[in-house]
Every structure is written in structure tokens, then in C-alpha cells.
């Protein structure tokens, strides 16, 4: 047993996991072989979801260990048998799942966890915490990237969420199609490109806007972005070009009617002989406002609150349900929250053109005959608690998102509420 586990994730869980563990150890059911399945019952009007957080989750599972510090805290609530069991805990079961960046739909078996009841039930809260957050952010980011077309998006929502959630959100947004982040921890941990300019406070600090711009350009060169709406935008743009010249990289507009202001800014920049200076807009943007700006002379977008909170859906709505015990299907029968028993897998059917037509969910061991353009979705992630193969990179996930969105029917890219882009068929 490790004496100290400073990076342990073991207490990132709910007490009821340990309540069930103690009870199962007491009555002997803890060792029964079980499969839990992660899925969502619906998309709440969206057309698709993006699986995100899988590498983060596998790392968290590897660090789900109880050292002296964790056990000392749990001593007040658990009996000696349970504490002794936890002291030797490592997840030694199997995990299969959709690769990061893959699409999911209602009922998709996004992740399956197989092992003894005791070791598998322990992971419920951790699994859902990571996948629900990251998938919600990545799904929102993908919608925004789709709305933006080829124009870059910068994630800048660190100040609108928990400090650690901000790092995970930056990663998920990059996976979903954003080009960069303002969050330096995300840049360090995940090699995501970072960017940043200045806030209104920097202009207010100086005696004049010209002084502020001169200081910024003096320190950073013309390859920077000047915030021009602290006072009067028209004067701010004129001052920016006067100070930095036509080689200035970009200006940023952070308030007001962004479409109208972008048009006026473009005309003014062109008149001033600065046609190559780009226009960045920010300020409470989401996928809908980004789509509304598609026809405007905007070169890139900065998005904060909306992306880190899933643009109104801060959780993906995934659940972790027991579906099999000792090889026999089990299912919750509540009419309000129905689940389907049995350990499952899934495949996606495509037209010869590459357009997805349906998600087929089937019991393991009963895979239907594969048609020419079918693709089985889950892949092995852990076997006997050990990673399978080389871990995919974040860039792999970004490329998977791009390919997945390209495979959707045209209706599947609509931002308006509607049915899932691909129907789910259960065999």
C-alpha cells in the first residue's frame, strides 16, 4: 500500500459508492462479475454528441488508489474489512469505449466497465464526472466550430468556471475544433496553442489609449491584437493603426453590435491602408451568434462562458448503469428511467458515400453480420487494468471529430432543436 498518494483520485467520488461496497463485502456479493454501461438517454434537442475526456479518465482510473491519507479520512465511516479492501484497491478489470472524438447518440454504449461488482461500482462517480463535463464542452465546441466554418475560435472561458474545470474545458474545446486557448495550464499539459492580448484595464491604466497601444506594441511587436473598444471604437482603430502601422496583426471588438461594428471596422481599416489587419470579436458569443456573424467581415472569434458551460447544457446527461451480473442481463424497469440489460457493443452504418445512416446497438457475442460500410465503434481501452495499445493523441481526437462531422447528413449540422442526426436501432 502506498504510504502517500498526493495525486490520488480515490476521493473524487460519492459516499454511496463506499456504502454499496461495504454492504456487498458483508454479504459476499462484492465478487460477482458485473458490467456497467455508460450511455445517455437523450440529446435534449441537439443532433449529436462528441465523446471527450477518455484519456483523462484512464489516467484518473490509474490514480484511483487509497493511501494512508485517504484511509484515515474514511476510517470514521467504514468498517475494518472495507478499509482493508480499499488499501489494496486497483482497478483490474476491463474497459471498452468509443474513442475520443467519436460521435454518440441516445443509447450509444459510450463506455463499458467490467470487473467484480466491488471494483467496478467504485468508478461510477469518477467516470461520469469526467465524461459528462468534457463531452458537454466538446459537443458545444463542435457546434461552434461548425457555425464558424473555417474561421478560428479561441477558448477564453477560464474566468467563468472552476480553475481545474477550466483546464479540462480548454482541452475539450480544442478537441471539438477550437484553434487555441487563453489558459496557460492547458497549454502546458496538453500542448494546445495559447494566445492572449490585453484587457480594458490595460488601456485604463495609461493616460491615453495611444500610450497603452504604444506600450503593448513596444513589448510584443505588431504581431499582436489591440483592444479598440475601451472608449470610442472609431478613434481606437485610428489610434491602433497610427501606433502599430498596417502590419498590425489584428484588432479586437468586445462589445456592442458585433456585426455592424465589424463592417464599420473593416471599411475603416481598408480606408486607412490596412486591409490585412484582422478583426477579432468576443463578448458572450455562442453557436447562434457565431452563425449570425458568418456573413460579416470577422476573421476569428473569442468564446468564453458559453463553451466552458456547454452552451446551456453543462452536462452530457450520461448515466452509469449495471447491465449484466455473472453473464446474465439485468435492467432497471422504472418507466421513467428505462435501461436495457446485457453487455452491449455498437456499430455505425454508412452509405457508400460515407454518410452515416444509423447506430446499431447489439448484445456482445451477437454482432450482426457486417455490411460493406459498417464500422464497429467501441475499442478496448483497458484489459486487466492495463492500457491497451499506445494512447491516442489529442490531435488524433481532433481529426476524428472532423471526420465524424463530415459523415453526418446535412440536417445533422443544424443548430436548431431536432431529432438526432442518426437514429439508434437496438437489436
Image (spheres, rainbow, N blue to C red):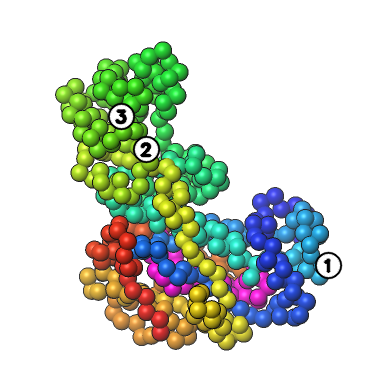
Mark 3 / mark 1, whichever is N-terminal: 1
Q: Residues within 10 Å of mark 3 (few under 14, many from 20)?
A: many
Does the magenta segment cover residue 104? yes
Task: Indicate the secondary structure of the residue bearing disc 3.
Answer: strand
The boundaries of the magenta stretch are 91-120
In the visual, does 100 lie left or right of 80? left
Report which residue position mark 2 lands on: 283
Report which residue position mark 1 lands on: 80
Q: Residues within 10 Å of mark 2 (few under 14, many from 20)?
A: some
Task: Indicate the secondary structure of the residue bearing disc 2.
Answer: loop
* Residue 189 seen: no
**In the image, what residue occupies the spot 41% across and 12% down?**
207
**Quadrant position of the N terminus in the picture:** bottom right
* Label 2 – label 1 distance at C-alpha: 55 Å
Does the magenta segment cover residue 260? no
* Label 2 – label 3 distance at C-alpha: 14 Å
Residue 23 lies in what quarter of the image? bottom right
Report which residue position mark 3 lands on: 251
Residue 270 lies in what quarter of the image? top left
Amino acid at each position: 500500500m502506498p504510504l502517500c498518494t498526493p495525486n490520488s483520485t480515490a476521493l473524487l467520488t460519492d459516499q454511496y459508492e463506499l456504502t454499496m461496497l461495504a454492504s456487498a463485502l458483508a454479504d459476499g456479493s462484492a465478487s460477482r462479475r458485473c458490467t456497467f454501461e455508460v450511455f445517455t438517454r437523450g440529446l435534449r434537442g441537439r443532433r449529436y454528441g462528441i465523446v471527450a475526456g477518455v484519456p483523462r479518465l484512464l489516467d484518473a482510473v490509474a490514480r484511483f488508489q487509497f493511501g494512508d491519507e485517504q484511509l484515515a479520512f474514511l476510517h470514521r465511516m467504514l468498517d475494518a474489512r472495507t478499509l482493508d479492501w480499499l488499501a489494496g484497491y486497483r482497478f483490474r478489470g476491463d474497459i471498452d469505449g468509443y474513442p475520443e472524438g467519436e460521435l454518440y447518440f441516445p443509447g450509444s454504449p459510450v463506455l463499458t466497465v467490467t470487473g467484480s461488482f466491488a471494483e467496478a461500482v467504485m468508478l461510477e462517480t469518477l467516470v461520469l464526472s469526467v465524461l459528462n463535463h468534457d463531452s458537454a464542452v466538446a459537443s458545444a465546441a463542435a457546434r461552434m466550430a461548425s457555425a464558424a466554418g473555417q474561421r478560428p475560435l479561441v477558448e477564453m472561458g477560464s474566468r467563468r468556471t472552476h480553475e481545474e474545470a477550466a483546464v479540462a474545458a480548454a482541452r475539450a474545446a480544442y478537441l471539438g475544433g477550437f484553434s487555441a486557448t487563453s489558459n496557460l495550464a492547458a497549454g502546458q499539459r496538453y500542448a494546445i496553442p495559447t494566445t492572449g492580448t490585453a484587457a480594458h484595464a490595460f488601456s485604463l491604466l495609461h493616460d491615453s489609449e495611444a500610450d497603452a497601444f504604444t506600450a503593448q506594441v513596444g513589448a510584443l511587436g505588431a504581431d499582436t491584437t489591440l483592444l479598440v473598444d475601451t472608449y470610442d471604437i472609431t478613434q481606437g482603430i485610428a489610434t491602433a493603426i497610427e501606433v502599430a502601422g498596417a502590419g498590425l496583426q489584428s484588432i479586437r471588438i468586445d462589445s456592442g453590435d458585433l456585426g455592424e461594428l465589424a463592417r464599420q471596422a473593416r471599411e475603416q481599416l481598408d480606408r486607412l491602408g490596412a486591409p490585412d489587419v484582422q478583426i477579432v470579436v468576443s463578448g458572450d458569443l455562442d453557436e447562434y451568434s457565431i452563425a449570425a456573424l458568418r456573413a460579416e467581415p470577422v476573421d476569428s472569434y473569442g468564446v468564453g462562458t458559453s463553451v466552458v458551460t456547454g452552451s446551456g447544457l453543462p452536462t452530457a446527461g450520461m448515466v452509469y448503469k449495471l447491465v449484466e451480473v455473472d453473464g446474465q442481463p439485468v435492467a432497471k424497469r422504472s418507466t421513467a428511467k428505462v435501461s436495457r440489460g446485457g453487455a452491449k457493443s455498437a456499430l455505425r452504418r454508412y452509405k457508400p458515400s460515407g454518410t452515416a445512416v444509423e447506430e446499431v446497438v447489439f448484445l456482445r457475442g451477437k454482432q450482426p453480420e457486417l455490411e460493406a460500410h459498417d464500422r464497429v465503434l467501441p475499442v478496448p481501452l483497458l484489459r486487466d487494468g492495463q492500457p491497451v495499445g499506445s494512447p491516442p493523441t489529442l490531435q488524433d481526437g481532433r481529426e476524428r471529430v472532423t471526420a465524424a462531422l463530415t459523415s453526418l447528413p446535412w440536417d445533422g449540422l443544424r443548430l436548431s432543436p431536432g431529432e438526432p442526426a442518426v437514429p439508434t436501432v437496438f437489436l
